[in-house]
């Protein structure tokens, strides 16, 4: 019976979508019978779905003619789509500027409410030798500068519990696997406001990262640049941190970050 209910719900959704798509610039209004004929649906079905769409704001009914037209709720949704696409464009544009300023690949990441690291945006360096990753999920965040920034600002109890459950593997000879030492490093990162990973995640790569604070304390992202050791070792870390902080301040106003929630809470 559950399968039949699911199929029925899917059919209703498809029919409701068909009703909405029946309204065009050339035909902005329709009566129930006209809609039923156009969509080859029973009049009673169209009447029921149209009434529901009116109650939700997706359709409006003219009291004088009883005809339906598209509702303002659709305009609101369309505005959200535009804002979301524009917001991603503005963030990417700022990361592109960061790449031009540093010559290195730029990453923006956050923790999901379940505590998983995920990249929100990436812009790759145009240099022949560059750092590049095509994945969206962040593996071994405790061994990367960008992941450590995200971990460093977790509540102490959450952080300590998380580290106690981690199986930290040595990815390179430089990887810190001692949990007490890692906890010390994370607390230092929180105090100084940036992190540096010198070939701990991957040999031949350095990463520098700073936090990006959202509108609330538990809304946090991290911004990083990643490049080959041969170039990154020649940079001034304080200078790179200031460049990153400037970009982070610009990006912070654009972010709508979902807060991390402790799964054990």
Image (cartoon, rainbow, N blue to C red):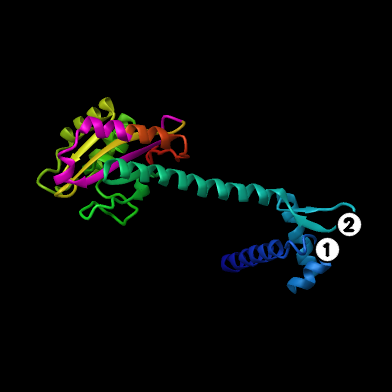
Q: Quadrant of the N terminus?
A: bottom right
| Quadrant in the picture for the C terminus | top left
**Residue position for label 1:** 31
Sequence-first tag of 1 and 2 = 1
Residue for badge 2: 65
> Which residue occupies the foreground of this view, 22 or 186?
22
Q: Which residues are magenta?
A: 216-244
Question: Could you say whether the residue bearing mark 2 is in a helix, strand or loop?
Answer: loop
Q: Is residue 125 visible?
A: yes
Q: Is residue 60 left or right of residue 18?
A: right
Q: Is residue 213 left or right of residue 102?
A: right
Which residue is painted at 77% across and 64% down in the image? 27
Residue 251 is labelled as none
For the point 83% across and 58% down, which residue is it?
67
148 on left or right of 59 = left
* Mark 1 element type: loop
Label 1 crowding class (10 Å Cα cut-off): few <14, some 14-19, many 20+?
Answer: some
């Amino acid at each position: 019976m559950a399968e039949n209910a699911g199929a029925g719900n899917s059919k209703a959704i498809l029919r409701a979508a068909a009703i909405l798509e029946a309204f065009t610039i050339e035909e902005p209004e329709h009566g129930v019978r006209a809609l039923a004929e156009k969509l080859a649906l029973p009049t009673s079905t169209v009447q029921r779905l149209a009434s529901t769409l009116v109650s939700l704001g997706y359709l409006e009914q003219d009291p004088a003619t009883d005809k339906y037209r598209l509702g303002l709720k659709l305009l609101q949704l369309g505005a959200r789509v535009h804002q979301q696409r524009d917001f991603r464009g503005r963030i990417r544009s700022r990361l592109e500027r960061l790449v031009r300023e540093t010559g290195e690949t730029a990453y923006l990441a956050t923790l999901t409410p379940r505590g998983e690291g995920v990249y929100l945006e990436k812009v790759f360096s145009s240099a022949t030798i560059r750092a590049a990753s095509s994945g969206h999920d962040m593996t071994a965040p405790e061994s990367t500068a960008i992941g450590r920034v995200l971990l460093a600002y977790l509540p102490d109890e959450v952080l300590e519990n998380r580290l106690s459950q981690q199986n930290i593997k040595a990815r390179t000879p430089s990887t810190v696997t001692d949990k007490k030492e890692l906890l010390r490093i994370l607390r230092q990162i929180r105090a100084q406001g940036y992190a540096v990973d010198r070939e701990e995640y991957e040999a031949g790569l350095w990463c520098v990262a700073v936090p990006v604070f959202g509108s609330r304390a538990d809304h946090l992202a991290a911004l990083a640049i990643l490049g080959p050791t041969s170039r990154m070792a020649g940079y001034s870390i304080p200078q790179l941190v200031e460049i990153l902080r400037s970009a982070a301040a610009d990006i912070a106003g654009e972010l709508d970050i979902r807060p991390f929630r402790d799964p054990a809470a």
